[in-house]
Image (cartoon, rainbow, N blue to C red):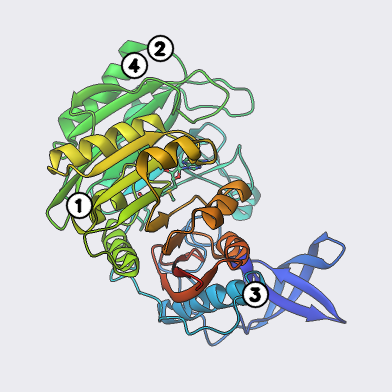
């Protein structure tokens, strides 16, 4: 098993990355891409199936880009995730052989996500069998993007990622839209009304639904929103966005609350976290708790430390560790998430946190340091791209005693760790499985300043 969930094969000293197979399958391959140092391929004929295979439980497996590892058992998935962390740290990070704590498995291996984003399209993906049959198919789809195809959407019948009432809400929106002739979007021509549907479900039972449309047609929109309000009493926050832009992102647009509150609440160890429509919140709430406990444990706080929480999102880690620290400073560039972070401190009576909106690269300057003091502990949780090289350099200069590096991409984490190794030693490594049935792995690393 290689990076990005692909498998690795060799032929006459050539490395071939193969998608849609399991380690141990015996297959004939068709080369799909030829690069200087490697090839990419897809299977065309299976001579034998690997013993590691299990029967995928979702009818959309193999077409949908969502759960690409359903064909291998959960224990095997964990084995390969642990290995992925080890390989990246050793090869890219040049960390040397370090013991890695066994990966923290997820109790739930299905229905574990708190957020899903579905796209409307009037150009649904058809399978080869559908194309070859003479049947007419409804081309309206509400579902997920086909991997690497921005314009092709797979109509989802049942998704195993988010618990009830997620599937019912999606199916009901689809049915209402069909009944009332609401036009599904066409991403090539950029026309149509319905663009996307976001469902967020919190562990408190709160449910947020956001409907994005391309233009203002309040009659059609209100009809759909009323339909949701009447049929799903579980929805505590019903919102909409009118998005006439070229893409579906709405961080720069107004999100309007139609019914209920404009946010939902997550709960953790008695703390309540307010999550707005634009805020990041870890998508597997149960495992987020495990991840944060590990992070807090690695930070080794005694109550006297100044902690910087970089890439703080809605300030969840900052607020989670605040009781064990002297003060916590959180930095994040989404301004509305910082507003949530401040609110999350105030609704939980936490008075020793401060939050700043801005690019970490710009914010972490001398004035900032003078104002907040030298950090004893830095917690950093960057997006998949990892930290900007200037931020990594800055961390080397700041010389905090400990750095806890939380990452959703062990490859970029390993790259950053190599630079940090100028002043820091890796002490502990703990992978966490936030996303069962996928190749994604989260990893927490404790670094200590070298003597
Ligand atoms: C993986 S999330 C971590 C969020 C948070 N630590 C949590 O556990 O909920 C990464 C966060 O970094 C923010 N971000 C990405 N690049 C940034 C930058 N250059 N400066 C500040 N924040 C950034 C994103 O908006 C996102 O909220």
Residue at 58% x, 73% y is 89
Rounded to the nearest whole Å, what is the CA distance between mark 2 and mark 1?
33 Å
Residue at 41% x, 22% y is 182
**Sequence-earlier tag: 2 or 3:** 3
- Residue 167 seen: no
Please provide percent x and percent y for residue 341: 28, 39
- Does dot 2 land on a helix, a strand or a loop? loop
Residue at 44% x, 54% y is 381
> In front here: 372 or 445?
372
Asked if residue 349 lies left or right of residue 148, the reply is left
> In front here: 437 or 407?
407
Rounded to the nearest whole Å, what is the CA distance between mark 2 and mark 3?
54 Å
The correct choice, above or below, for 284 with respect to 204 in the image is below
Crowding at mark 4 (Cα within 10 Å: few <14, some 14-19, many 20+)? some
Crowding at mark 2 (Cα within 10 Å: few <14, some 14-19, many 20+)? few
For disc 3, the marked residue is 94
Q: Nearer the viewer, mark 3 or mark 1?
A: 3
For disc 4, the marked residue is 220
Rounded to the nearest whole Å, what is the CA distance between mark 4 and mark 1?
32 Å
**Sequence-earlier tag: 4 or 1:** 1
- Does dot 1 land on a helix, a strand or a loop? loop
Callouts 2 and 3 close, C-beta under 8 Å: no
Q: Nearer the viewer, mark 4 or mark 1?
A: 1
For disc 2, the marked residue is 216
Asked if residue 193 lies left or right of residue 372, the reply is right
Rounded to the nearest whole Å, what is the CA distance between mark 4 and mark 2?
9 Å
For disc 1, the marked residue is 203
Crowding at mark 3 (Cα within 10 Å: few <14, some 14-19, many 20+)? some
Asked if residue 187 lies left or right of residue 166, the reply is right
**Sequence-earlier tag: 2 or 1:** 1
């Amino acid at each position: 098993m290689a990076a990005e969930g692909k498998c690795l094969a060799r032929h006459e000293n050539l490395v071939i990355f193969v998608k849609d197979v399991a380690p141990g399958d015996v297959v004939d391959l068709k080369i799909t891409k030829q690069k200087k140092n490697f090839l990419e391929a897809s299977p065309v004929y299976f001579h034998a199936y690997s013993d590691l295979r299990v029967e995928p439980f979702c009818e959309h497996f193999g077409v949908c880009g969502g759960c690409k590892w359903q064909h291998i058992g959960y224990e095997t998935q964990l084995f390969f995730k642990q290995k992925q962390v080890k390989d990246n740290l050793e090869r890219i990070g040049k960390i040397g052989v370090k013991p890695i704590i066994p990966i923290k498995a997820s109790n739930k291996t299905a229905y574990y996500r708190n957020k899903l984003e579905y796209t409307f399209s009037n150009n649904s993906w058809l399978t080869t069998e559908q194309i070859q049959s003479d049947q007419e198919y409804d081309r309206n789809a509400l579902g997920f993007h086909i991997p690497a195809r921005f314009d092709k959407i797979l109509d989802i019948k049942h998704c195993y990622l988010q618990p009830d009432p997620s599937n019912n809400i999606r199916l009901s929106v689809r049915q209402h839209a069909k009944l009332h002739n609401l036009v599904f979007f066409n991403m090539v021509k950029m026309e149509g009304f319905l663009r996307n549907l976001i469902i967020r479900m919190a562990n408190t039972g709160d449910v947020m639904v956001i409907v994005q449309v391309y233009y203002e047609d309040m009659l059609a929109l209100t009809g759909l929103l009323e339909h949701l309000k009447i049929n799903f009493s579980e929805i505590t926050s019903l919102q909409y966005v009118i998005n006439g832009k070229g893409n579906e992102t709405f961080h720069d647009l107004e999100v309007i609350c139609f019914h209920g509150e404009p946010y939902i609440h997550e709960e953790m160890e008695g703390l309540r976290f307010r999550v707005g429509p634009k805020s990041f919140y870890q998508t597997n709430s149960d495992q987020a708790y495990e991840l944060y406990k590990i992070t807090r444990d690695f930070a080794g706080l005694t109550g006297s430390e100044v902690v910087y929480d970089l890439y703080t999102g809605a300030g969840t880690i900052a607020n989670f560790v605040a009781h064990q620290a002297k003060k916590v400073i959180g930095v994040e560039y989404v301004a509305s998430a910082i507003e949530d972070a401040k609110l999350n401190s105030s609704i939980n009576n936490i008075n020793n946190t401060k939050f700043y909106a801005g690019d970490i690269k710009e914010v972490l300057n001398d004035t900032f340091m003078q104002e907040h003091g030298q950090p004893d502990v830095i917690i950093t949780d960057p997006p998949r791209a990892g930290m900007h090289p200037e931020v990594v350099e800055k961390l080397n200069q700041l010389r905090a005693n400990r750095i806890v590096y939380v990452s959703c991409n062990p490859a970029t984490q390993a790259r950053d760790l190599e630079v940090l190794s100028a002043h820091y030693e890796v002490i502990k490594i703990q992978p966490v499985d936030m996303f069962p049935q996928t190749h994604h792995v989260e990893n927490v690393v404790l670094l200590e300043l070298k003597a």
